[in-house]
Image (cartoon, rainbow, N blue to C red):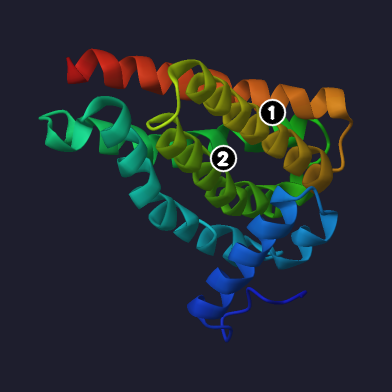
Amino acid sequence: MPGLSAPRVSLETQIAAGLRAAWLLGQGREEGLRFTLLSIEGAKRSFWAGAICLLPFLLIRALASGVLLSHSLPVELIGYVLGWVVFPLASLSLADASGRGPLWPVFVAAWNWTNIAQYAALLLATLLGGVLPSTLGGTLTLAAFGYALWMEWFVTKTALRVSGARAVLFVLLDMSIGLFIASIVSRLAS
């Protein structure tokens, strides 16, 4: 689907293609990259995935901590937005340092769209974890988290055409940023 992100392509078509990319990449299928919008415009439009993931995020937070009923919701939402913006910006420097800067728009688009599959897995694990015995629920949540990490590693390795070890650096960067943002949100929300 080269050229999918050209201005004449509707946003609805691009979102549908992004959802297909998430489905394929979530299965470990490299051909999902063809649907990730292979241009700067496509990378920008892939941030619509953040809007799609907002409801699962809120549900997960509500089920885990009751955040929807709390005064901390604005702080949680700011943290959510930062999570969608800071890592892509930080990953540009790492992609450039790896000699993969020209592939960064493909990576960002793929990373954004696969977040939908990650949130779906985490929401399913959270919902099932609420009705299953705690040990089984915890194991399911851990498996969903492992799947999300694997998916990010796979997308990084595939989209940037880097080694598995180099892809781990991107995943660690994302985890570090996420943990940093979560710690600030936690302090501000309490």
Give the side of residue 77 with respect to residue 119, left or right.
left
Dot 1: element: helix
Q: Nearer the viewer, residue 42 or 71?
A: 71
Residue type at mark 1: give it.
Phe
Label 1 environment density (alpha carbons within 10 Å; few <14, some 14–19, many ≥20):
many
- The residue depicted at 54 percent of the width and 59 percent of the height is 46
**Residue at image point 68% right, 76% down:** 4
Q: Quadrant of residue 79?
A: top left
Give me the C-alpha separation between circle 1 and circle 2.
10 Å
Q: Which residue is mark 1?
A: 170
Q: Which residue is located at x 79 percent, y 47 percent?
A: 28
Q: 35 above or below 88?
A: below
Query: Which quadrant, please, contains the N terminus?
Result: bottom right
Element at badge 2? Answer: helix
- Residue toward you, 57 or 140: 140
Residue 88: mark = 2
Would residue 112 appear left or right of 31 to someone viewing this image? Answer: left
CA neighbours of label 2 inside 10 A, class few (<14), some (14 to 19), many (20+): some
